[in-house]
Image: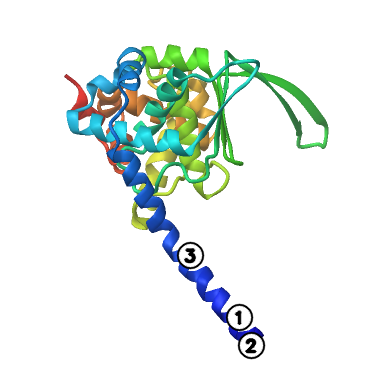
Amino acid sequence: MPALIVSALALLLVVWLLGQPWLTERRREKLRRQPFPKAWRSILQRRVPVVRRLPADLQLELKRHVQVFLAEKSFIGCDGLRITDEMRVTIAAQACLLILKRPRGYYPGLREILVYPGSFVVEREHTDAIGVAHHAREVLAGESWERGQVVLSWHDTLEDAATPDDGQNVVIHEFAHQLDQETGAANGAPVLVRRAQYAHWTKVLSDEFRQLKGMIALQQASLFSDYGASDPAEFFAVISEVFFEQPVLMADAHPELYQQLTLFYQLDPLSWQS
């Protein structure tokens, strides 16, 4: 009898696990069918002008993603900041832009978005090559953590959203890190649609990363921020900002790199330009 009970419980567990994706998608589809609140529509119009560039079908799809994202993710105010719908919708719309056509869900490892009124200070400790410990304080506008959290400055979020063509966007940057972290630590090699794409992805991004470092060494101007030369993870986040905000310049100056990002995001922001 105990063996039968164990077998039955195991069977129930398997059935439950197999049914979870179906139940999750059913719940999400119900959320996507709900009317998009008028107040949220007003927030998008005022705070996220990039949405106006999207074709009508993508605008509708983005709104549906926002509804699911806001139902599934928690927002926490820091340093006394009270979270409002304006904050939630503004951040969610930009985060969902990155997953508009990606098939892997709504940042499955992400639980919470922590929002500070402005830049925040992070204490860092590291040990150098000869074993000496160092302590440093960094002032940041955003950060993405592997343990399921994104941290954002509301001031910088607003500023970056208001200027959607300068190639700088803290929300896009940090949520690109989240995509990169789906398989562990960010390393500039996020999950691609097909395994066969990795060889070309690695070659193109590695070549462009080395080129950026070389241009910085020669003090030459680049379309990409110098911060992108920090490491491959930061390079991926920086080029994602430019991909969504300055697609014309990127496609012209870095066509192969632009093509790799269209395959990754399954979007072509060039087609949104008026």
Label 3's element? helix
- Mark 2 residue element: loop
- Of the 4 image quadrants, the one containing the C terminus is top left
Compute the Cα span from label 2 to label 1: 6 Å
State whether residue 64 is above or below residue 140.
below
Q: Choose the circle earlier in sequence order: 3 or 2.
A: 2
Q: Position of residue 207 (x, y in %)?
A: 41, 38
Residue marked by disc 3? 16
89 sits to left or right of 247: right
The residue that mark 1 highlights is: 5
Foreground: 131 or 62? 62
Indicate the amino acid at tag 1: Ile
Name the disc covering residue 126, or none.
none
Q: Residue drawn at (55%, 34%), measured in percent from left and top? A: 112
Of tags 1 and 3, which is closer to the observer? 1
Q: Position of residue 208 (x, y in %)?
A: 40, 34
Residue 58: image location, x then y, percent: 23, 33
Q: Going by the image, does 237 lie left or right of 242?
A: right
Q: Is residue 264 visible?
A: no
Q: Position of residue 137 (x, y in %)?
A: 72, 20
The residue wearing badge 2 is 1
Q: Nearer the viewer, residue 56 or 268?
A: 56
Q: Is residue 195 above or below residue 149?
A: below
Spatial distance from mark 1 to mark 3, Cα to Cα?
Answer: 16 Å
- Tell me which amino acid carries mark 3: Trp
Instruction: Pick the quarter of the image with the N terminus.
Output: bottom right
Quadrant location of residue 147?
top right
Query: Is disc 2 in contact with disc 1, using a CB cutoff of under 8 Å?
Result: yes
**What crowding class fits label 2: few (fewer than 14 Cα within 10 Å), some (14-19), or many (20 or more)?**
few
Image quadrant where residue 222 sits = top left
